[in-house]
Image (cartoon, rainbow, N blue to C red):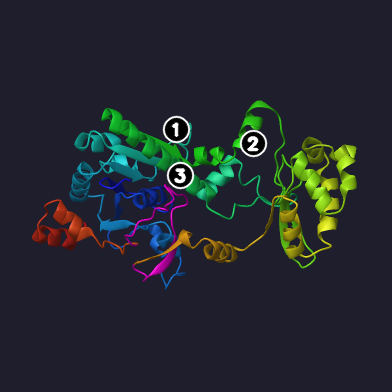
Amino acid sequence: MLNGLRVLDFGSALAAPYAAMMLADLGADVIKIEKPKRGDLIRFTDEYVAGQSGYFLGINRGKRSVTLDLRVPEGRDIALRMCADADIVVENFRPGMMDGWGLSYEDVRAVRPDVIYCSVSAFADAAGFEGRSGNDIVAQAYSGIMAMTGEEHGPPAKAGAPAVDVGAACMATISILAAMIRRIRTGDGARVETSLIEAAHALMPNFTASALNGSPVFRRLGSGHPQLVPYEAYPTSDGQYVVVGAFHQESWRRFCRAIEREDLIDVPEFKDNARRVANRHAVDEIVSQELSRRPLGYWVETFEREDVPVAPVLEVEQSLAFFADRNPDVVTDVDSYAGQIRMLKAPFRIDGCRPYSAVGVPSLGDSTDRVLDELGISPSDVAKLRSAGII
């Protein structure tokens, strides 16, 4: 789909590299630019996969790695030569860093006028935050996501997944593809920008409209939902947790029938979702009492039979095993510098096929010599660059 397009991934950590990986899954040739010797900072965050970073392996499939010191003129010049052959540039450095290296949008556009240049920042153009860096947990805190996460009377908690980073990566990818369509039609390149704070707010569309136009009090409720009841995880008799989401009227009626409490349907305080939200503690007390009488398996089977939204609360490893067994197309084996590893393919299908890049996860600088050769740099000059620590 994107075969023939070249992407330069200047990113670090998660947001930009994840966006670049999705482009690789769609067929683009992605070259990851990394610091000599050290590489991307997340190459060394953990040792979960054969002694190597599972964090890095999880978001860098389908790329080639080139080491390049962007802080020196020789490194900058090589980067610009690479940009001249690139269709897309992705970066998520602190605002101003690429400019300081002579790799700003204007610098790159001078050598590739139709380039699509994507920047993922922490705070976009928020006044007072110019030049500020930030990461997933910072954006969760500033956006309200953290305040919405955790037990009702406990401290705020980070969402378990890096939801903001991944959300920003998805926003970046959508915008890049839209800009590419425009380039095909008009020949024009584009400056594409998104940020962690914008992505974080975008992850809460059900809350933001109300907060901007009304005066709701949205606060953390554990696994509960401030706008829907019942809609959370409840303990069962065997020490497990079952999630039910019976907030609209028909599902509420089916739910009451499933727990053999049809008398609740006509209780005035529980008449509709708005009233159940206003009386959530009373609803939760009854529901918790009823669901604690039976084990998890009973409730999953019963609610499924009654067509009530239901799920067991699974650990990550349980979920992956559960769905990989039922949908083997979602997992593939990939070569990497840590050996052959199992990875998830792209989280979507096109014409029934789930795209993924057959190119493995690169070791640091694995394609440096090849890419420099493609630029016409001689082996002797490559040796001098390596001796000088530029690559």
Quadrant where the C terminus lies? bottom left
Q: Secondary structure at mark 1?
A: loop
Main structural element of the magenta stretch: helix, strand or loop?
A: loop
* Horizontal side of residue 378 vs 67, given as left or right: left
Taking the spot 82% from the left edge, 55% from the top edge, the residue there is 288
The answer to whether 363 is drawn above or below residue 114 in the figure is below
Quarter of image, res 343: bottom left
Q: Secondary structure at mark 3?
A: helix
Residue marked by disc 3 = 170
* Horizontal side of residue 201 vs 266, given as left or right: left
> Label 2 sits on what residue type?
Phe
The answer to if 348 sits in the magenta stretch is yes
Task: Calculate the distance from the C-alpha at mark 1 to the C-alpha at mark 3.
Answer: 20 Å
Label 2 with label 3: CB-CB less than 8 Å: no
Q: Which residues are magenta?
A: 337-360
Judge whether residue 301 can be spotted in this image.
Answer: yes
Residue marked by disc 1 = 125
Across and down, in percent, residue 293 comes to 84, 62
Mark positioned earlier in the residue sequence (1 or 3): 1
Residue marked by disc 2 = 207
Taking the spot 58% from the left edge, 62% from the top edge, the residue there is 319
Q: How many marks?
A: 3
Across and down, in percent, residue 154 comes to 72, 52
| Observer-nearest of 229 and 294 | 294
Mark in the foreground, 1 or 3: 3
> Label 1 sits on what residue type?
Asp
Mark 1 neighbour density, 10 Å: few (under 14) some (14–19) many (20 or more)? few
* Horizontal side of residue 133 vs 226, given as left or right: left
Task: Calculate the distance from the C-alpha at mark 1 to the C-alpha at mark 2.
Answer: 23 Å
The answer to if 19 sits in the magenta stretch is no
